[in-house]
């Protein structure tokens, strides 16, 4: 997602239209996708959900894993598209741009090189200098995604506070070659079960337990990733 992003403006983008794309095709070289905690349950039926740590800030992010190595999205070249796509994909090519002077204010940005950006096909973004109902809907989706990521940051911070995130490596046999997947973190089920009653009750009251269990069960999707890798090595 390193394509040129510009602020959306009715004068500059009066004739721009967007086509819908329910595909990982534009992200063939991206193996991690940010997820909100609100997506965990649905996303867990398709992807392995893990946490990665920023080496500079030390902050953790919740992500969907789509490849076994950086620069590899096995779902982008799979014969069947997943039934669920992360918001980071469905919101594309629109993004929120923060105002450096007023961090609580945002504008809408557009990845201008995206294949969905058209002139003759798709949904119009502006009409008569005003945003269309389609653009209004897309803006609401972006703002909702941003708000959900804020909740997710609080969720991850809570996991850290209770020392529930642990590093986990996975090893795969890919046609006789051993492949090691490192640098990821998961929720420790053992530590979860050892939490004090009041802490566990707090997680339940906050509505985080379904997401926690979804993350744990999603690790079975690593087998799907390995199978996709093997099929593409054939």
Image: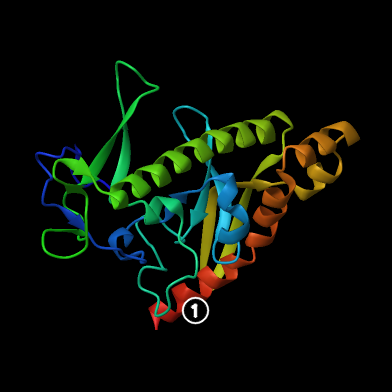
Dot 1: what SS?
loop
Outermost residue on the top side: it is 101
Q: Is residue 158 left or right of residue 125?
A: right
Depth check: 44 or 125 in front?
Answer: 125
Depth check: 63 or 149 in front?
Answer: 149
Outermost residue on the bottom side: it is 234
Outermost residue on the right side: it is 197
Image colouring: rainbow
| Residue 234 drawn above or below residue 154 | below
**Dividing the image into 4 quarters, which one contains the C terminus?**
bottom left
Depth check: 176 or 160 in front?
Answer: 160
Taking the spot 81% from the left edge, 47% from the top edge, the residue there is: 190
The spot of residue 217 in percent (x, y) is 69, 61
Taking the spot 17% from the left edge, 48% from the top edge, the residue there is: 127
The spot of residue 201 in percent (x, y) is 84, 37
Instruction: Name the residue tied to disc 1.
Output: 175
Question: Image quadrant of residue 26?
Answer: bottom left
The spot of residue 5 in percent (x, y) is 21, 41
Q: Is residue 222 left or right of residue 128?
A: right
Is residue 177 among the parts visible in the rendering? no
Q: Give the number of marks.
A: 1
Is residue 181 among the parts visible in the rendering? yes
The spot of residue 131 in percent (x, y) is 24, 43
């Amino acid at each position: 997602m390193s394509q040129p992003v510009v602020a959306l403006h009715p004068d500059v983008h009066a004739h721009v239209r967007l086509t819908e794309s329910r595909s990982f095709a534009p992200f063939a070289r991206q193996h991690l996708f940010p997820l909100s905690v609100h997506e965990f349950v649905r996303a867990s039926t398709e992807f392995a959900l893990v946490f990665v740590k920023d080496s500079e800030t030390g902050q953790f992010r919740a992500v969907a894993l789509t490849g076994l190595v950086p620069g590899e999205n096995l779902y982008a070249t799979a014969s069947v598209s997943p039934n669920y796509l992360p918001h980071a994909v469905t919101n594309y090519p629109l993004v929120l741009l923060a105002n450096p002077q007023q961090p609580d204010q945002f504008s809408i940005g557009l990845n201008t090189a995206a294949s969905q950006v058209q002139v003759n096909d798709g949904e119009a973004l502006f009409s008569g200098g005003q945003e269309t109902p389609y653009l209004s809907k897309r803006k609401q989706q972006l703002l909702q995604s941003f708000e959900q990521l804020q909740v997710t940051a609080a969720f991850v911070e809570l996991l850290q506070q209770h020392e529930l995130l642990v590093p986990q490596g996975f090893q795969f046999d890919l046609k006789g070659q051993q492949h090691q997947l490192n640098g990821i973190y998961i929720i420790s089920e053992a530590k979860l079960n050892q939490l004090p009653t009041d802490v566990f009750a707090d997680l339940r009251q906050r509505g985080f337990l379904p997401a926690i269990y979804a993350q744990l069960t999603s690790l079975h999707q690593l087998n799907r990733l390995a199978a996709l890798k093997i099929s593409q090595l054939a």
